[in-house]
Image (tube, rainbow, N blue to C red):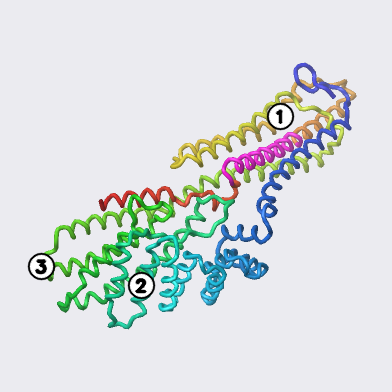
């Protein structure tokens, strides 16, 4: 059956090339399947075939929740027979509390020259109350390269906590003083990560912050111990060396915060907050000493206290909005995925309804030869191209931060508007295609009505079938292009959603300026 010059279906018996129509239909289905298979194969090959099985499982575990990651890493370590240190270290960092120290011991024995692993092991020993063993680990990490002030401070904390309640703290504070004047930077361990994964996103940032919290915990206990021992003696009038000792502890806090020359990889709000909190608590004690010794508090101490409080409040303000900002960013990445999933689901339902209705109306394969009008082809092609443009716009918004919700709502509204238009057009399309169809002789009216009904439901079914298949191809093209441009797939939200690392660094730099 062919179209007349006006693009409408003429009145005539079904004719044409049924075999060719069937080949065209199968070719379209094959093209859609090939497109989906290609995109899936790229994702599968990268996740499961690009690296060895153990390496792929290790890579996967780095981005999973703790419970899931723990089960995978236990299997990896078991199959690896403990030969690869990073697998042991990764498992140790998320192991359950009753076996975490034994896991860290295994990792430490497999890689005794890794100072950052030793620091984490020492912190776990410290938090378990094994202060003497923790001190040995910190001392060992402190003599290895690169030069690092952090294990020295941790060693001082472990030494102080291992002493009896009335022990002499002069050795502890002498170690702090030597570390303050050493010029060595404070270097925190960095998370275990895979070279094929981007070092950004909420997943990597969370791991980094967890390590900073782990390393700061002994320093908080150290500060509380010193201040707890200082206050009763100061209140009793025994000032002794407490002012100079508190000054050394304050210097440790300043080193934790860092300065403008510090490596950004070692700056963050957990360590900055720890540094400022230590300084603020120490200043309270020094003010008390100052007032008892001189009858008044020095202006310099009061001014420094004001600046530190302002800096600490700035950091806390940022931290209070962190979760909401991350959630807002997550919605930006989820939106195109949600829209695509909803579109596919609704189109599939409409197609299945059209398929079932067509069979109830007994449309047969003869209607395959009925060609689509130029209007139908143009609408399908234009609609699919617009969907691809909208997906590209969402991707563009994700790289332009901060993003206002205004353009996001506009594109979302345009998406729903386009989808609604294409669905309504699909329902009206057969009537438009059959418009102007001339009636046959009266004796053939019954056959004419059956033919018209068959063509009507056949065109609906094929229109939505083409729209569904074409949209699947659009989504696959977008996913592949996204992977080539961003290095990850749009479904890998934990690697894409920002961890606010840039904003966090800007906040730390800003509060550093307050103390100049």
Q: Quadrant of the N terminus?
A: top right
Q: Earlier in the sequence, mark 1 or mark 2?
A: 2
Instruction: Please give the residue where the numbered disc 2 appears in the rendered image.
Output: 157
Q: Marks 3 and 1: CB-CB under 8 Å?
A: no
Q: Residue at x 41, y 56 (%)?
A: 266
Q: Residue at x 41, y 79 (%)?
A: 132
Q: Secondary structure at mark 1?
A: helix
* 94 shown above or below 309: below
Q: Looking at the picture, tell me which residue is in the foreground, 441 or 208.
A: 208
Q: Earlier in the sequence, mark 3 or mark 2?
A: 2
Give percent across and percent down for residue 165: 30, 82
* 108 shown above or below 10: below
In whole angstroms, how far apart are the C-alphas of marks 3 and 2? 31 Å
Instruction: Please give the residue where the numbered disc 1 appears in the rendered image.
Output: 429
Quadrant hosting residue 246: bottom left
Residue located farthest toward the left when viewing the structure as drawn: 295
Instruction: Please give the residue where the numbered disc 3 appears in the rendered image.
Output: 294
Q: Is residue 418 left or right of residue 29?
A: left
Q: Nearer the viewer, mark 3 or mark 1?
A: 3
Q: Residue at x 17, y 58 (%)?
A: 300
In whole angstroms, how far apart are the C-alphas of marks 1 and 2? 77 Å
Q: Find the magenta span and give its range.
A: 461-487
Q: Is residue 423 left or right of residue 272?
A: right
């Amino acid at each position: 059956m062919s179209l007349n010059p006006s693009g409408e279906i003429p009145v005539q018996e079904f004719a044409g090339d049924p075999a060719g129509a069937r080949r065209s239909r199968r070719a379209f289905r094959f093209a859609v399947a090939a497109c989906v298979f290609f995109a899936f194969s790229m994702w599968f090959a990268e996740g499961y075939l690009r690296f060895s099985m153990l390496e792929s499982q290790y890579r996967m575990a780095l981005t999973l929740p703790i419970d899931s990651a723990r089960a995978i890493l236990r299997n990896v370590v078991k199959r690896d027979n403990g030969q690869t240190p990073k697998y042991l270290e990764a498992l140790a960092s998320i192991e359950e509390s009753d076996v975490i120290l034994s896991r860290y011991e295994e990792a430490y024995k497999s890689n005794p020259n890794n100072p950052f692993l030793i620091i984490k092991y020492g912190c776990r020993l410290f938090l378990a109350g094994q202060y003497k063993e923790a001190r040995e680990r910190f001392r060992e990490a402190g003599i290895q390269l690169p030069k690092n002030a952090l294990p020295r401070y941790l060693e001082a904390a472990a030494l102080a906590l291992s002493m009896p309640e009335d022990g002499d703290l002069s050795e502890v504070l002498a170690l702090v003083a030597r570390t303050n004047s050493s010029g060595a930077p404070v270097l925190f361990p960095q998370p275990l990560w895979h070279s094929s994964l981007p070092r950004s996103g909420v997943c990597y940032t969370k791991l980094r912050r967890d390590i900073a919290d782990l390393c700061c915990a002994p320093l908080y206990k150290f500060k509380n111990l010193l201040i707890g021992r200082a206050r009763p003696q100061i209140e009793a009038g025994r000032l002794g060396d407490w002012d100079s000792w508190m000054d050394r502890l304050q210097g440790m806090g300043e080193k934790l915060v860092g300065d403008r020359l510090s490596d950004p990889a070692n700056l963050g709000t957990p360590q900055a907050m720890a540094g400022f909190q230590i300084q603020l608590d120490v200043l309270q004690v020094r003010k008390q000493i100052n007032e008892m010794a001189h009858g008044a508090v020095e202006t310099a101490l009061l001014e420094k206290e004001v600046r530190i409080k302002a800096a600490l409040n700035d950091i806390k303000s940022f931290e209070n909005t962190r979760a909401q900002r991350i959630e807002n960013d997550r919605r930006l990445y989820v939106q195109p995925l949600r829209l695509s999933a909803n579109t596919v689901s609704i189109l599939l339902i409409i197609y299945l309804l059209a398929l079932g209705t067509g069979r109830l109306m007994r449309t047969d394969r003869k209607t395959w030869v009925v060609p689509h009008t130029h209007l139908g082809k143009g609408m399908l092609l234009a609609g699919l191209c617009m969907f691809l443009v909208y997906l590209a716009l969402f991707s563009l918004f994700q790289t332009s931060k901060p993003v206002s919700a205004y353009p996001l709502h506009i594109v979302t509204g345009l998406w729903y508007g386009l989808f609604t238009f294409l669905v309504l057009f699909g329902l009206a399309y057969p009537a438009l295609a059959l418009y102007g169809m001339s009636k046959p002789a009266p004796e053939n009216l019954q056959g004419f009505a059956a033919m018209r009904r068959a063509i009507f439901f056949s065109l609906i079914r094929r229109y939505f079938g083409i729209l569904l298949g074409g949209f699947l191809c659009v989504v696959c093209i977008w996913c592949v292009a996204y992977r080539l441009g961003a290095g990850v797939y749009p479904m890998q939200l934990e690697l894409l959603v920002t961890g606010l690392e840039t904003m966090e660094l800007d906040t730390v730099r800003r509060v550093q300026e307050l103390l100049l």
